[in-house]
Amino acid sequence: MIDPMQLLHQRDGRLTRELLLEPGGFGLGRVPAKVKPDATTNMVCGYCSTGCSLKVHLKNGEAINLSPNTDYPVNLGMACPKGWEALTVLDAPDRATTPLLKDASGHQRPVDWPTALTAFVDNFKAIQEKHGKESVAFISTGQMATEEMALLGSVAKFGMGIKHGDGNTRQCMATAVVAYKQAFGFDAPPYTYQDFEESDVLVLVGSNLCLAHPIMWERVMRNKNKPEIIVVDPRFTETAMSATQHLAIAPKSDMDLFYGIARILIEHDWLDHDFIAQHTNGFAEFAEFVSTFTIERVTALTGLTEAAIRKFAETIHSGKRVSFWWTMGVNQSHQGVRTAQALINLALMTGNIGRPGTGANSITGQCNAMGSRLFSNTTNLLGGHDFGNPAHRAKVAGILNIDEAVIPNEASWAYNEILEGVLRGKIKGLWVICTNPAHSWIHQTQCRDILERLDYLVVQDMYHTTETAQYADLVLPAAGWGEKDGTLINSERRHGVIKKVRRAPGQALSDFSIFRLIADAWGCGDMFKEWTSPEAAFRIMQQLSEDQPCDITGIQGYEMLDAAGGVQWPFTKANELEELGLSAGDDGFNTPASQPAQRRLFADGRFCHADGRAKFIFEMPKTMPEPPSDRYPFILLTGRGTASQWHTQTRTSKSDVLRKLYPERIYVEINPADSRRLGIRSGEQVLITSQRGELDATAFITPSVQPGQIFIPMHYESANRLTDAVFDPYSKQPSYKACAANVMKK
Ligand SMILES: Nc1nc2c(c(=O)[nH]1)N[C@H]1C(S)=C(S)[C@@H](COP(=O)(O)OP(=O)(O)OC[C@H]3O[C@@H](n4cnc5c(=O)[nH]c(N)nc54)[C@H](O)[C@@H]3O)O[C@H]1N2
Ligand SMILES: Nc1nc2c(c(=O)[nH]1)N[C@H]1C(S)=C(S)[C@@H](COP(=O)(O)OP(=O)(O)OC[C@H]3O[C@@H](n4cnc5c(=O)[nH]c(N)nc54)[C@H](O)[C@@H]3O)O[C@H]1N2
Ligand code: SF4
Ligand SMILES: [Mo]
């Protein structure tokens, strides 16, 4: 049992300082303290993975407004509505301002931090004593600072003995991670955003770039090569409308299409033989494999015409700089990894990688999904290392100065396995940080049932009203973006800084401080005594990254990141010598003098496998797990609805401006042919059912979905009542984008 008062006065007064100074706002963060009180300061946006830089305007040291940064190599003065409104959502009335503890009657009541920490420690320790250390797990995020992720992963796994911890990055990027690791030997998206402008052919697969990554799309619009833009998406999305070729593919038939394209490229000898011979393995087997993907077969499976498929192949061949981009239409599939690799294979066989305007490029989702991939200590051991590799464990133990025995020797269960673990009675306690599974996880009814079964659920969030926080035994109030320091890594591997420019409300604390408090309360604080601040944690991350493909040992702290307009990994000590002092890069942008050049990977054709070669990986496509049936004749697609909505809407629904930019109520897109047949008009209420549940929605009749398909945006609370808990076998990423459903007039 911990005495809260004793806790407050433990060692060197650190806790006291954090508890009293941070929430009360006796002084703002490190960086603003150094700028003039009414000056501006730059920081990267905390929503999507584009990583735009925002210029925050300060009054008396505190943020009062913001505008996009014109000097940053990512956004060049642009921002989308979410970025513009990023400060507004911090003031919402449902911000969590004190810890909340469920009392005997089941009501969440405000408590002070010492009480909350005691409840956290007592309950999780009691569960561990009764059911074993592995019976407590955590689920985290791609939306905290990298330093926070690294501290969480270290405290939980090395300090608290938690073995299983995963993140919402599983819902999002796991497929790309596995696809890259298997094909390239490391989770290494090779591109830089300049490639959007330097391609002459851009292939966008399962990506609605226009609204999910609007500023990346602006970069495409700046392309001066009159590029062919090929969009592969079952829906006629905003992005498809701006494309030169739209392939409205039958859902989940992408592998058939790309294998068919590979066959055509081989048939015509439209190959880069030198690249294949010098830098890849497995091409002969791949060529043999795709020989059965005849045009007849591919047209039948994809629903595309022979002419459209041949034109696609010809366009790839005629392009000098072809880039292949993919997002959730690929990753969220029952064969996501192999689909991503089918695209990677096209880039490899045509030598479209490592040069400007090329690449097999996975676009990340959340602001720091890349950070979570490298430093969250869930899928990988800190710094892109491998839990199963003894040398890696020894290296990490040495840098952290901890006993190697506390490092698990295998990776954690994946998100779905952790939830299944609850059903199997293996997981009894769960700590959910910066994610909202009761809304966002697949097959929602089952997910909520699982949350209810837990002996103890802790939710750490900015808002106490999230669907998941409703289930919590304990809510820990977190500071959000703008209220804390740290770094994020964007889609093009660029580390950028976030800063504390606002006081967090009430007693809310940065996640970093919460993790340190928990470590102290747990009794393992000494293990993390070097992690005194986010910047100290960044230095530890730098050491961890040494000699890895994501080496960032050359970055000279936050100040360099600030001055240089962010830095893309890798940035080794050697890079530092070469590139510091360089004036503008070779990109022609008006960037600060210290801006390092645009940096892409694999320019030398060397990949990260031991032999330096990339691998062709392929597998027979399988039919979709839940095809339409008599009872559920439609294929339900889900995804992003507008540029102004973010995921489960805890943040974006708090801005008056953003709320005006999207429909208030849940809607379903239905093709006119189907609506005529069913007698449904636009604006009418319809009932959508699947094997797992039902929901009411407003009908939106639009030819952007094909007959037999419907689309529902994920942002509304009930969307995942319908989705089917199907996972890619390698990445365990949920297949959110295709299940069988029915539509009925109400
Ligand atoms: N405004 C806004 N922007 C966001 C987000 C947000 O919530 N709001 N979230 C961010 C995050 S975390 C992510 S992961 C990204 C997601 O960004 P995107 O992946 O671009 O967005 P989605 O709408 O989920 O899915 C993209 C497309 O996949 C298509 N699709 C569905 N099934 C298939 C298929 O079988 N094959 C193919 N080829 N396509 C298919 C859908 O029709 C959809 O248009 O967006 C990021 N940006
Ligand atoms: N049907 C369907 N479902 C989907 C998808 C889909 O395409 N279709 N897409 C999936 C994808 S790609 C993703 S990434 C997930 C996203 O799913 P979630 O991660 O569940 O969605 P968010 O709304 O981003 O949740 C983030 C939570 O963190 C809180 N938060 C924000 N900043 C901070 C902070 O600094 N600290 C703390 N402690 N909390 C903070 C927010 O208030 C919010 O509650 O959804 C997935 N679900
Ligand atoms: S595009 Fe993404 S990073 Fe840029 S302002 Fe919008 S949400 Fe923020
Ligand atoms: Mo995502």
Image (cartoon, rainbow, N blue to C red):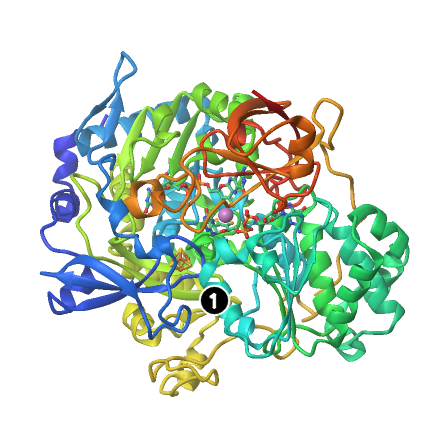
Residue 109 falls in which quadrant of the image? top left
Q: Is residue 306 left or right of residue 199?
A: right
Image quadrant in which the N terminus is located:
top left
- Residue 436 is at least partly visible in this image: yes
Ligand 3 sits in quadrant: bottom left
- The residue beneath circle 1 is 218
- Residue 250 x, y percent position in the rendering: 73, 45
The residue under the point 12% across, 69% down is 36
Q: Under tag 1, what secondary structure?
A: helix
Image quadrant in which the C terminus is located:
top right
The residue under the point 21% across, 41% down is 508
Is disc 1 surrounded by few (<14), some (14 to 19) or many (20+) residues within 10 Å? some
- Residue 58 x, y percent position in the rendering: 16, 62
- Residue 153 x, y percent position in the rendering: 41, 46
In this view, the residue in front, 295 or 519, is 295
Q: Is residue 487 left or right of residue 672?
A: left
- The kind of residue on which mark 1 rests is Glu
Q: Is residue 86 above or below residue 8?
A: below
- Residue 429 x, y percent position in the rendering: 41, 27
The residue under the point 55% across, 73% down is 195
Q: Is residue 427 left or right of residue 692?
A: left
